[in-house]
Image (tube, rainbow, N blue to C red):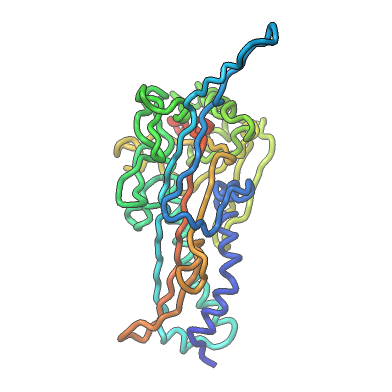
Amino acid sequence: MPTNADVLNFATQKLVPKWTEQFYQYHPVLDKIVLKGNIERGNQGGPYLEFPVVTNGPGQVTRIETGSEVYSSVRRTVGTRGQIYCPRMVYSFIIPGKDLAEASGETAIARLIKVYPEAALMEFHEYIVGQLVNGDGSANNVQGFLTLNGDTTFNASGTDEAGILDFAAKTGQTESVLNITKEGTGSGTTGWYNQYQNVSSFATDGRKQMRRVYWDASLEGKQGGPVDLMLGDITSFNNYYDDLDDQVRYNIKSDGERGKGVRQGLMFQEAEFFVEPALTPSATSFGSGSGRDGVVYFLKSDTWHLYTQGEDSGMETKGDFAFRGPVKVPGQDAWEWEIVLAMQMYCDRLNANGCVDGTSNA
């Protein structure tokens, strides 16, 4: 018998939790954040979230010699508050009534799900990942989500904000990131900067410069452990792989969504170094439009957090790639579905993260 929109919606909703978890597992950044427990669902504090940032120890030591010393209770100004806005994005798609009428049986329903809701969700996933690593999401209206790329901006609330990781030494990092001015301005917040190094050629100093950023970032916020995640473009990853020769320690791979290639990685010190297929250093979003010769991001996942907004699955939705609908399209033999995302990321210890460029130079 023909399939109606409610039957298709019921089948789709049964798969949504699985698809959502697949997205977190599909991308290493989100997977690490979830595993660390740094995700807050249904944040009720409004679209703007303020979070505490402490970039160093807040006090100082008093040496006791006679026992009558007064503590040096000077408070160092190392605590401040960051701010981030949670954008709301809706991906809408239409399924013709003709396709529903001609779908008969479980096989036909499964085919419709694959062609429409599953394909829509996978594309939405890819838009967000591209924005995260490249900051080029304006073409797909997802530029409100945060980007790691410090060469460009993201726009969550109508105002351009600097990408998180600068490709510059500390003294050259002068913009405001997450509403906190970086240390490079001189009057900025001490400790609010990211680690950075440039590779002249991978054969010459590739692993050396990567180690420098890895250790510089790992030593900050030591209670969170070392840098545990690295993302690089395919050329940079292959340069590292080739440079290892027979020193490869072991290979890590995790399945992505069906139809996608497996995500593969190698160990770098204690970090998992993954190929990021969406990372395109030659894009105009890098290097003031001229691109960069390879990019590797170094992330300490303990310093990253994720939050969503929304509670009612039938109204505003839970904001985690939630499906809403179907609604009859007026004047058309078609039904419309929506995928709603109200999600944002932020970092509370910037100097425990970093980036390297030039890594695609052999």
Q: Position of residue 98 (x, y in %)?
A: 41, 87
- The one nearer the camera, 259 or 139, is 139
> To which quarter of the image does residue 93 belong?
bottom left
- The one nearer the camera, 166 or 74, is 74
Q: Is residue 362 visible?
A: no
Q: Is residue 193 above or below residue 320?
A: above
Q: Is residue 46 above or below residue 183?
A: below
Q: Is residue 75 above or below residue 304?
A: above
Q: Is residue 146 visible?
A: yes
Q: Position of residue 143 (x, y in %)?
A: 36, 52
Q: Position of residue 227 (x, y in %)?
A: 59, 34
Give the residue drawn at x 52%, y 20%: 74
* Horizontal relation, residue 255 to residue 296: left or right: right
- The one nearer the camera, 323 or 282, is 323
Give the residue drawn at x 46%, y 72%: 315
- The one nearer the camera, 294 or 270, is 270
> To which quarter of the image does residue 1 belong?
bottom right
Give the residue drawn at x 52%, y 65%: 311
Give the residue drawn at x 57%, y 64%: 19
> To which quarter of the image does residue 149 belong?
top left
